[in-house]
Image (tube, rainbow, N blue to C red):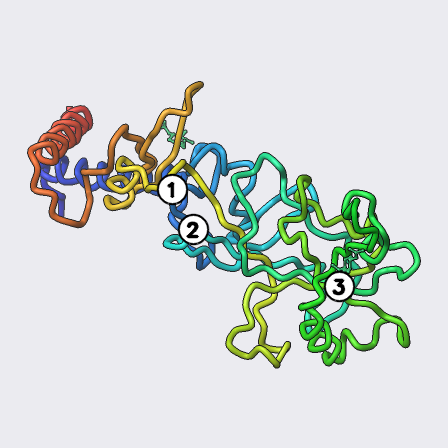
Amino acid sequence: MKFSSPSTPTLSIIFLSTSLLQLTFISSQICQRSCGKLPFKFPFGSDPGCGDPRFNPHVSCSQGNPIFTTHTGSYPITNIDYTKKVMYISDPSMSTCSCNQQSKGFSLDWDAPFSFQDDNVFALLDCSLSNSPVFQQNSLCTDQKNNSKVSLCDNQGAPICSFLYSCQAISTINLPISTCCVYTPVDLGPAFEMDLEKLQCSSYSGFYSFNEHESDPNSWNYGIALKYKFSVNNEYPDSCVNCERSNGVCGYYGNYNSFICNCPYGINTTNDCFFGASYNYGSRLRSLQIGTWLIYCLAWLLVLVL
Ligand SMILES: *[C@@H]1O[C@H](CO)[C@@H](O)[C@H](O)[C@H]1NC(C)=O
Ligand SMILES: *[C@@H]1O[C@H](CO)[C@@H](O)[C@H](O)[C@H]1NC(C)=O
């Protein structure tokens, strides 16, 4: 029995579909819409060319793990609140109620578009009583008319310190003399720096919320909350709204960091991803784009058949 000849166009169509599928598979969207379980939206980008160029050196996606990087290290991003424009990170070297460990501290890069959220509390732990500037007279912080010492610790933070010392992990440091200082310059001064070597402290603890259990340090939200800013009024760029609505990811290219919309299947446009979008746009532009694509596919088919 012989197969009939009309099967050639059918075979071509099958071949075309397969090669298109492969094309799709190979050149998939470069900019990822999420990193692990965390949605990645403007201004953040998973790769170079994605998101806002000013954020690219500081936020990345490494094998499904969202990472925030400063000159003091790389920190897992635990959450991003796109409405409040706050990013939450954890510092694996910091001490918490369940874990006490040595740390070198934490610093922001001065030129990064991030700042500390007001709710952050930093407690410096186990600082040298004789050498640490947090307890010593600091010429920068001395009131010239009144010669009394100005401490870098917040006296009203004393309850926080006693709660932290109720944690078994923390109560074991350097007994009987250990210290705790709720650090007042929470924006870490002009250098945005909490250098524990300079401050002569062996570790620190940081949290951004009591998590409604003020007297239970076990349930506090440990980590650091950072505000971010991408423009004067922090308004979402219109171009980006449309791009994301059509399953695209906002990105940039070229010498002038021009806006691009990185669409599924690796196609970049200067506006958004009308084609293949699963919602009803109903605009003339959309039909025009679909028309272009149909012509494109027909041309391919002809090339393959002939
Ligand atoms: C699309 O944009 C991404 C992100 O900028 C870039 O990496 C990629 O090379 C671009 N692809 C094309 C086909 O221009
Ligand atoms: C110095 O400041 C402290 C605390 O603010 C205050 O109690 C004290 O009276 C001041 N001393 C003088 C001489 O002004």
State left or right for residue 282 relative to residue 238. Answer: left
- Amino acid type at image mark 1: Asn
Residue plotted at (57% across, 47% down): 68
User: Is tag 2's residue or tag 3's residue first in the polypeptide sequence?
Assistant: 2
Residue 2's spot in the image, x, y percent?
Answer: 13, 44
Given residues 271 and 62, the one toward you in this image is 271
State left or right for residue 214 relative to residue 20. Answer: right
Quadrant for residue 286, please give it.
top left
Residue 181 marker = 3
Which residue is identified by label 2? 85
Instruction: Verify CB contact (< 8 Å) between mark 1 and mark 2.
Output: yes
Given residues 132 and 164, the one toward you in this image is 132
Marks 2 and 3, Cα distance to the nearest angstrom?
29 Å
User: Is tag 1's residue or tag 2's residue first in the polypeptide sequence?
Assistant: 2
Residue plotted at (50% across, 38% down): 55
Quarter of the picture containing the C terminus is: top left
Residue 81 marker = none
Q: Determine the secondary structure under disc 3.
A: strand
Which residue is identified by label 1? 234
Residue plotted at (38% across, 34% down): 251
User: Is tag 3's residue or tag 1's residue first in the polypeptide sequence?
Assistant: 3
- Amino acid type at image mark 3: Cys
Marks 1 and 2, Cα distance to the nearest angstrom?
9 Å
The relative height of residue 288 versus residue 81 in the rendered view (above or below) is: above
Residue furthest out toward the right = 130
Marks 3 and 1, Cα distance to the nearest angstrom?
34 Å
If the picture is divided into quarters, which one holds ligand 1?
top left
Q: Which of marks 2 and 3 is in front?
A: 3
Residue 248 at least partly seen: yes
Query: Label 2 neighbourhood size at 10 Å, few (<14), some (14-19), many (20+)?
Result: few
- Amino acid type at image mark 2: Lys
